[in-house]
Image (cartoon, helix red, strand yellow):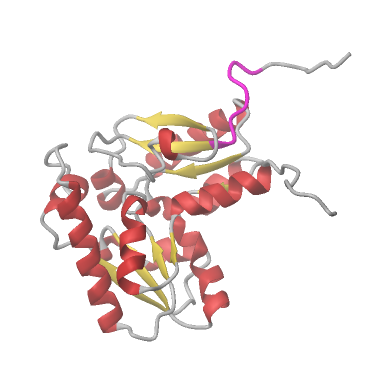
Amino acid sequence: MVTHPGGQNICGITIGVLSLESYFPKPPGHIKNPSSLGFTVMYEMLDGITVPELLGNPTGEMKDRLIDAAKRLEAKGVRAITGSCGFLALFQAEISAAVSIPVFVSALIQVPMVHHMTQAPVGVLTASAASLTDAHLRGVGAADIPIAVQGLDETEEFASVILRNERTVMDLDKVTEELLQAGRILVERAPDIRAIVLECTDLPPYAWRLQQQLGLPVFDLTTLSGMMATAVLRQPYPGYIS
């Protein structure tokens, strides 16, 4: 007879997501589009915390709400916790210290790893270069890592929808072209980079196009989440010996 202690309302969830409030489209590849993910997810909604609010006014009250949400996800049985905005890097240390499961709230946590892999400066494409501070980099252990940063601050479509929250309708083709342009500028400014990290969780849907254009490895939150899902829920490998 096999028994289980129970105690969970929903079972079988691998990754919990601290989800900021946003209503623009999330194409396949976005951490908030579960239809495209290769692992199970649970979302803890943080109504009232938007991207503009996180970038412009990251308060102690916001941190406390994030910590409480992380604790709720842990209590619901998720195996690891991520977030829906890379600028949550500011609170990485505090959130991870508050729970007993792995926390990786920003794709920027990969910057040190990518640097050690390549022994070269790391290219960072971010939603807002103006908002990316030393505090965010310190939060993920990347303060001393050489990086080259290019933001989408001055774009038309991406900035108006995501950074300024002016509307929810979004031209995905235009966003793709804005990202590709940012990628071209980045490698022109920093030709010695050998890999790119996408800070923004809204960019992974277009990462394949970026790689087609630049021919470089591209790291983002969605691929990191997949790796973490594998790490916290190991499965036997398929195949045979002989």
Which one is in front, 152 or 211?
211
Q: In which quarter of the image is residue 135?
A: bottom left
Residue 59 in sight from this viewpoint: yes
Q: Which residue is drawn at 60% across and 33% down?
A: 78
Residue found farthest to the right: 1
Q: Position of residue 131 (x, y in %)?
A: 28, 61
Q: Which residue is drawn at 12% across and 38% down?
A: 167
Which one is in front, 101 or 184?
184
Is residue 203 shown in magenta?
Answer: no
Which one is in front, 58 or 155?
155
Residue 164 horizontal side relative to residue 239, left or right:
left
Q: Quadrant of the C terminus?
A: bottom right
Q: Where is residue 50 in the image (x, y as percent from the top left)?
A: 28, 40
Q: In which quarter of the image is residue 28?
A: top left
Residue 140 in sight from this viewpoint: no
Q: Position of residue 75 (x, y in %)?
A: 61, 27
Q: Is residue 33 above or below residue 12?
A: below
Residue found farthest to the bottom: 192
Q: Is residue 79 above or below residue 224?
A: above
How many marks on residues? 0
Q: Is residue 42 above or below residue 199?
A: above
Q: In which quarter of the image is the N terminus?
A: top right
The rendered magenta stretch, by its main secondary structure, is classed as loop
Q: Which residue is drawn at 20% across and 47% down?
A: 172
Q: Where is residue 93 in the image (x, y as percent from the top left)?
A: 54, 53
Is residue 13 shown in magenta?
Answer: yes
> Magenta part of the protein: which range?
8-15
Q: Residue at x 16, y 43 (%)?
A: 170
